[in-house]
Each structure stands twice: as structure tokens, then as C-alpha cells.
Image (spheres, helix red, strand yellow):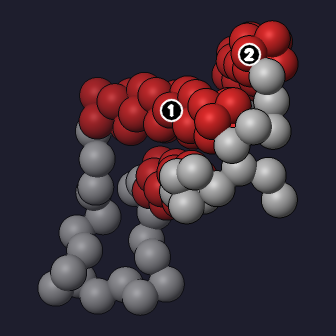
């Protein structure tokens, strides 16, 4: 595995976005651990879900930047590769945003 300058912390960001996405996917559904004392059938408003989605996008961009900078600082990529791959990764993220 390349990089390591940031102790691979960028991968923790993926775990965070996955957890936020779980919250979005499970919004307004009765969880398996349903207990009326702890859950009343309503969680987050549409406005809050929209902000969660914005947060996911920003965290994904941060992960991309961390990965590309990590590889540059570790010597795995040169500056030309850094700029090319950063552009490619951001373009791919934007494409996936519209494919979903």
C-alpha cells in the first residue's frame, strides 16, 4: 500500500460517510431494536437529510485530497501525477453524484 504520511486516516473518512449514509437510508424506518421508549417513528427532517448529503460530499472530497496529498508527500506520485489523479478522482466523484 502506498502513502502512509497521514497514518491512512483518509480511510477512516470512508467509514464516517458510510455511517452517515446508513442514517440517511434508515431515516423514518423502525429499527430492529425498536423500543417505543427510545424511538417514536421520526428521526430527521428533509432539511437535515439534505445537509447530511452535503456533508458526505465534502468528506468524500476531503478523502480524495488526503489520498492524493499523501501519495505526493510519500513520493509515490510526482506533482504531475498528483494534479492528474486529483482531477480524475474529483471528476469521478462528481459523475457518481449524478449517477445516483
Inter-mark Cα distance, 1 to 2: 18 Å
Q: Name the residue under label 1.
A: 62
Q: Specify the label residue 49 is tagged with.
A: none
Between 84 and 36, the one lying in front of the other is 84
Q: Is residue 3 left or right of residue 39?
A: right
Between 38 and 56, the one lying in front of the other is 56
> Measured along the vertical axis of the image, is residue 46 above or below residue 87?
below
Q: Mark 2 points at which residue?
A: 79
Q: Residue at the spot x=46%, y=28% of the render?
A: 58
Say whether disc 1 or disc 2 marks the residue closer to the N-terminus. 1
List the single residue furthest toward the front: 75
Residue 41: image location, x then y, percent: 30, 64
User: Which quadrant, please, contains the C terminus?
Assistant: top right
Between 18 and 60, the one lying in front of the other is 60
Q: Which element carries disc 2, helix, strand or loop?
A: helix
User: Which quadrant, please, contains the N terminus?
Assistant: bottom right
Q: In this view, does 91 lie to the left or right of 34?
A: right
Is residue 48 among the parts visible in the rendering?
yes
Q: Residues within 10 Å of mark 1 (few under 14, many from 20)?
A: some
Amino acid at each position: 500500500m502506498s502513502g502512509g504520511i497521514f497514518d491512512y486516516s483518509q480511510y477512516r473518512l470512508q467509514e464516517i460517510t458510510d455511517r452517515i449514509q446508513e442514517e440517511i437510508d434508515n431515516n423514518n424506518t423502525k429499527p430492529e431494536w425498536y423500543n417505543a421508549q427510545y424511538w417514536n417513528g421520526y428521526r430527521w427532517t428533509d432539511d437535515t437529510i439534505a445537509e447530511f448529503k452535503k456533508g458526505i460530499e465534502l468528506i468524500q472530497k476531503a478523502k480524495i485530497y488526503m489520498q492524493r496529498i499523501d501519495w505526493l508527500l510519500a513520493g509515490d506520485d510526482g506533482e504531475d501525477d498528483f494534479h492528474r489523479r486529483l482531477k480524475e478522482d474529483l471528476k469521478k466523484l462528481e459523475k457518481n453524484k449524478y449517477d445516483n
